[in-house]
Amino acid sequence: MDTNLITSLLKDVKKGKTSVQSALNTLKDIPFENIEFAKIDHHRSIRNGIPEVIYAKNKKTEDIVKIACAMMKKSGRFLITKASEEIYNALTETTSLKKIKFYPESGMISYGEAKNKNGRILIISAGTSDIPVSEEAQITASFLGSRTERLHDVGVAGIHRLFSHRKLLQKARVIVVAAGMEGALPSVVGGITDKPVIAVPTSVGYGTSLGGLTALFAMLNSCVPGIAVVNIDNGFGAGCLAHKINIMR
């Protein structure tokens, strides 16, 4: 449920196309819907601009399907992170939805993403091993309604690859940079653009990368001012923040 749906519903009541009782039935589960094992926050998009998203890891497949169906019924869309092909198959078999999208590389499942895209977010991955995290950011921002572009494999070991894409950096309103190893790329990007930069440390790297901690600490200690840093492998969080910045007037 979002502001557009509520506005449309109120207009229908005003025009007599929808009865007051029908409108009340539609709104009765705000602020949340209790389905015993979960309390679905249909009101979240109205409060902070980002709808509740299903984090699939450690959840039962049948529970994920029930939550997704409840979201679809109320708002006509849902987004699932850290999902598997098993969950995707269960959704397609349980529902009659034909346009559910599954992105195996990032483990994202989406249905009913925004049709009108605004602004421009550039999603950069340092190496190809960072693509799953950068794709999570891209799918999230696109689902929410931002126009996105992706740029892969332009890490600091071959920094000339990045410099050949300066026009892309100039066009972007927000830039998301996913990097593992020593996590240096966000600092490089931040040093050559005046656009907001969101750094995403990934868990890619050898022993002393410590599962992404080295990249995280490097990004937090960047000498480039104004870089925002999200948690390790949190492409979803980066996508949400980038979208919010992108749509600001």
Image (cartoon, grey):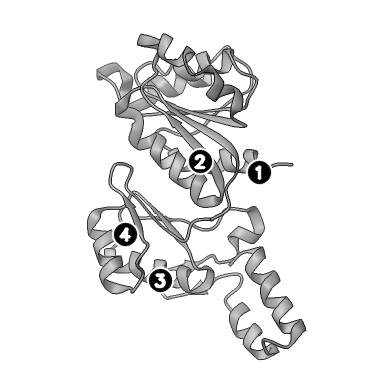
Task: Work out whether mark 2 precedes mark 3 in sequence or the reverse, and give the earlier one.
Answer: 3
Is the residue 193 above or below the residue 118 in the image? above
Report the Cα–Cα distance between label 3 and label 4: 15 Å
Work out whether residue 62 or residue 164 is closer to the camera in this orientation and state it: 164
Residue found farthest to the right: 14
| Disc 2 versus disc 4: nearer the observer | 2
Question: Which amino acid type is shown beneath numbered disc 4?
Answer: Lys
Residue underneath mark 3: 69
Tag 3 secondary structure: helix
Q: Which residue is mark 4?
A: 59
* x then y, percent, for residue 112: 47, 61
Instruction: Tell me the number on the disc at residue 239.
Output: 2
In the picture, the disc for residue 247 is 1
Where in the figure is residue 213, as x and y percent of width and height?
39, 24
Question: What amino acid is labelled 2 in the image?
Answer: Gly
How far, Cα to Cα, is label 2 from label 4? 23 Å
Question: In what quadrant of the picture does the N terminus appear?
Answer: bottom right
- Disc 2 versus disc 1: distance between alpha carbons? 12 Å
Could you tell me which secondary element the residue under label 2 belongs to?
A: helix
